[in-house]
Image (spheres, helix red, strand yellow):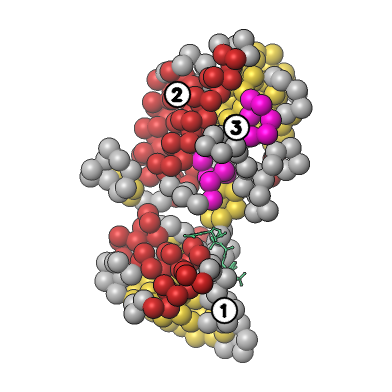
Amino acid sequence: MSDDTDVFQTLILGSGPAGWTAAIYAARANMKPLLLKGMQPGGQLTITTEVENYPGFPAGVMGPELMEKFEAQAIRFGTVVKPETGVKVDLSTRPFSVETNFDRVYRAHTLIISTGASANYLGLENETKLQGRGVSACATCDGFFFQDKDVCVVGGGDSACEEANFLTKYASKVRMLVRRDEFRASKIMQDRALANPKIEVIWNTHVVDVMDPEQGKVTGLVLENTKSGDRWETPTDGLFLAIGHTPNTQLFKGLLDMDDTGYLITKADATSTKIPGVFACGDCQDKIWRQAITAAGTGCMAALEAERFLEAHGHG
Ligand code: NDP
C-alpha cells in the first residue's frame, strides 16, 4: 500500500453538483482541494437526460454535459481530481485519512462529504435497460417529456404522491401502483392524490416486468396483484419509481450522526457534522429538496465553512 504523505487542506468525497461546487469554491480560495470522484462520477445527473431547471441554461443542458462543465470549472482553479472511491475513513484524529479502492491513503485537514444518494429501483432487468427511455426516478427532471401521455408511478409514500401530483401537470393520466392496500404517505399528501381527477390508485399491485426493450422505450408493464398473484399487462408510456432513496453514507456508520434512514445530520443552517473539520453537503445530507441546485448550494456552504475552519486552526 502506498502512503501519500502530503496533507491536503481539504478532501472532497463525491463528484455530483455538491462535490464539484465545493471544489470550485475551495480551489478559488487556494485550498488546493483533492476530489475523489467516487463510484458514480458526476452523480445522479449523469443518469438523467435533459436538465431544464438548472439556472443559467435557458435552452436546457444534458445532465452529463452539465457535470462536465462543473468538473472543468473545478479543474480550472486547481482542484486535484482522482478517479478513486473512498473505502475507509479515519476521522479519529486530524489530519483525517481516507483509504481508496486504489489502495492509496490520502490525508487532509478537512473533509467534505458529498457522496450523494441513489434512488431505489425495483431491480428488474428491463427497468435498467429502459432507464432514460421512459423509466425515471425523478418526476421533476423528466415529467415534462410526458405531455399528454399515460404514466405509472410506483410507491405509496410522500414522494410517490408528490410525484404523481406533479406529473398530472403534463400527463393525461397517472396511475399509482401501491403494493399494499394503504398509503405510507402523510394524510395531507394522500388526500391530495386521491382528490386529483387525473390520478387513479391501483392497490395491492407491483410491477414484475417493463416492456419493451426491443422497441427501446417503455410501452407497457406486467403487473401482479400482491394478494391473488394474478398477472396482467397494461400499456403505458412511462414508469416513475418513487420507492425511496438510499444515501451513500455506509462509510460513516458509527462515525457520524445519521438519521434512521442514513442521512448525515449536520448542524442547523450549516454543513458541519459532530466532528470538527468534517462537513456534509448535497443529497447525502438533504432528504427533502434533492435538487442539483440545492446540492450545489450546500456544496458552496461546505467549502466556505471548511475555509473558515482552516483559518481558525492555523492552516489558512
Ligand atoms: P418512503 O420510504 O416514505 O415510502 C416508500 C414507498 O415506496 C412506500 O409506499 C413503500 O411501500 C414503497 N416501496 C418501497 N419499496 C418498494 C418496492 N420494492 N416495490 C413497490 N413499492 C415499494 O419514501 P419517500 O421517498 O416517499 O419519502 C422519504 C421521506 O421523505 C419520508 O420521510 C417522507 O415523509 C419525506 N418526504 C416528504 C415530502 C413532503 O412532505 N412534501 C415529499 C417527499 C418525501 P410500503 O409502504 O409497503 O413499505
Q: Is residue 108 left or right of residue 52?
A: right
The quarter of the picture where the N terminus appears is top right
**CA separation, marks 3 and 1?**
38 Å
Residue 115 position, x and y percent, is: 57, 40
Label 2 CB, ligand 1: below 8 Å?
no
Residue type at tag 2: Tyr
Q: What type of secondary structure mainly makes up the magenta span?
A: loop
Residue type at tag 3: Ser
Label 1 CB, ligand 1: below 8 Å?
yes
Which residue is pictured at 50% across the width and 85% down the height? Answer: 232
Q: Earlier in the sequence, mark 3 or mark 2?
A: 2
Residue 231 - label:
none
Which residue is pictured at 66% across the width and 49% down the height? Answer: 259
Residue 272 - label:
3
Residue 67 in the image: above or below residue 147: above
* Secondary element type, mark 3: loop
Does 139 lie within the magenta span?
no
Residue 240 in the image: above or below residue 60: below
**Residue depth check, mark 2 versus mark 1: number of the one nearer the observer:** 1
Q: Earlier in the sequence, mark 2 or mark 1?
A: 2
Q: Is residue 197 left or right of residue 245?
A: left
Judging by the rendered image, the residue that carries numbered circle 2 is 25
Task: State the extent of the magenta-drawn residues as a range.
Answer: 273-287
Residue type at tag 1: Glu
* Secondary element type, mark 1: loop
Residue 182 - label:
1
**CA separation, marks 2 and 1?**
46 Å
Q: Is residue 126 visible?
A: no
